[in-house]
Amino acid sequence: MTDIEIAKSVKLEKINKIAEKIGIKDDELEQYGKYKAKINLKTIDRLADKKDGKLILVTAMSPTTLGEGKTTMSIAIADGLSKINKKSILALREPSLGPVFGIKGGATGGGRAQVAPMEDINLHFTGDIHAITAANNLLSSLIDNHIYFGNELKFKKVVWKRCLDLNDRQLRKVETGLSNEKNIKPRTDAFDITVASEIMAILCLSQNIKELKENLGNILVGYDEEEKPIYAKQLKVEGALATLLKDAIKPNLVQTLEHTPAIIHGGPFANIAHGCNSIIATKLGMKLADYTITEAGFGADLGAEKFLNIKCRKAQIKPDIIVIVATIKALKYHGGVEKEKIQEENVEAIKIGINNLKKHIENIKEKFGLRVIVALNHYNTDTQKEIEYLQNELEKENVEMSIVDAWEKGGEGAIDIANKIVKDLEDIQENDIHYIYDLKDDIKTKIEKVAKEIYGAVGVKYENEALQEIEKIEKMGYNKLPICIAKTQYSLSDDPKNLQGTGEYYIHVRNIEVKSGAGFIVVITGKIMTMPGLPRKPAAENIDIDNDGNVTGIF
């Protein structure tokens, strides 16, 4: 059976029943049909004095092109904890339409470990991402409208981009205002994918409407004729933008196929954005359950690094344990095996590829000072010899491993890791995050610390444009913000072809952008693009709907 067929074969509970399980009151629930709902923000206020539950962060080794199953693993762990009678909840990101119709497909888990209704969540869901797209593009239209009606603020350069939640490489650079109408000023513009929009980051990092509005007003939109910054609040638009986001800021409640509650809210990519769901969703989960399982995008060098250095600082939270997902295929992939041969037994390749996993473990344990457990996402092509080699190597590192059969067995296949997590959290004492950089460090020092300590690079090389932007950002007084590095997910380096992460390599910084509303600095490295393109054979070719409205092809 396909993922969507498995999902449709399960009878879901009504969403108000799911809400009851975790103590959400009827008047705090805003239903979107039978199986989806939004949670009113007053729930957070009501639970403010309640003790937080444990936080489990799921990340991964550097992935293959199809990912290593972090979402599937997160769901399975939550269901596994429920199986052993622990009160658990998920706090995940919303899927972007870009990968749904692109190379990766859907992002609601797989097999028996899914959140549902999967086709709704993967498509329009409750409209949050569309609201972000609308707010982003409203700001663009208001900027151009201001210029059209006399340009009182003296815009010389507009840095704000439009956005669309689809992969469309043709929109990376566009010419606008070409109608030849009087007073319209043609200019070069660009599109980001919506999940890379600063408004997505602002939504995820704001903890209430007041903070949302303030952060929206602080968006840097351009520079005037004297090179002074111009902010969204100077256009008097933060109220309108926040109004468009009035429902999007409320977290969404759904369920797993095993009826474990799941809060899905916000969805920034981790290779081009900060890769974590909303602070609201994570903190609400920690109030509602004893164990909250959340996920950070791509490998631990991206999503987990940003979760810890950006989100944890902002939210004043920390994970109690970090799960690193590994697969035998990814170990072979980073050991030099071609995709066509990745299902063949090859322990020698794993001996090379395991260095990638070990580096991620070292980063979490030694650099950040946090507890780690490895979850092997088990495939039927994995051989006993390969698994035993991995197990033995991790034992040498004093790292516990659990084999998880999430796709086939759901929560039943995650009971072992659930028990190990509970035992580890009972045994360990409180520990603090060792941040990789101090916020007082200058911008280049922050970049170099992440590049050297997390990526294993020997140094950083900057293009002239990046150096000029660093100088400008420091003059504006934003040098104390955390950094969000946009980098390929396929390698610890910024070269997606350097799968083994071998040799002495530098991180190449192409550009720097300050996101003054979101409160971080984006560092663009290598050939990373903030508007992805589609693959030669996009997933969209397989997606269809029949005359009865049944969707097929989302996986």
Image: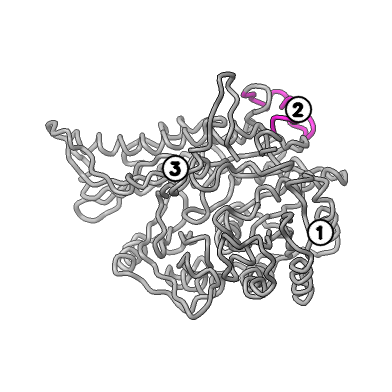
- Name the residue at the top extreme: 548
> The residue under label 3 is which amino acid type?
Thr
Q: Position of residue 78 (x, y in %)?
A: 76, 46
Q: CA distance from mark 1 to mark 3?
A: 37 Å
Q: Which residue is mark 3?
A: 194
Kind of residue at badge 2: Lys
Three-letter code, disc 1: Leu
Q: Nearer the viewer, residue 427 or 223?
A: 427
**In the displayed structure image, the side of residue 150 where residue 107 appears, left or right:** right
Q: Secondary structure at mark 3?
A: helix
Image quarter where the C terminus lies is top right
Seen in the picture, residue 145 relative to 429 is either above or below; the reply is above
Q: Which residues are magenta?
A: 7-32
Using the image as rendered, state which of residue 380 and residue 165 is in the foreground. 380
- The residue indicated by pointer 1 is 425
Q: Earlier in the sequence, mark 2 or mark 1?
A: 2
Mark 2 and mark 1: span between their CA atoms? Answer: 33 Å
Residue beneath label 2, please? 11
Marks 1 and 3, the one that precedes in the sequence: 3
Front position among marks 1 and 3: 3
Percent position (x, y) of residue 82?
A: 82, 43
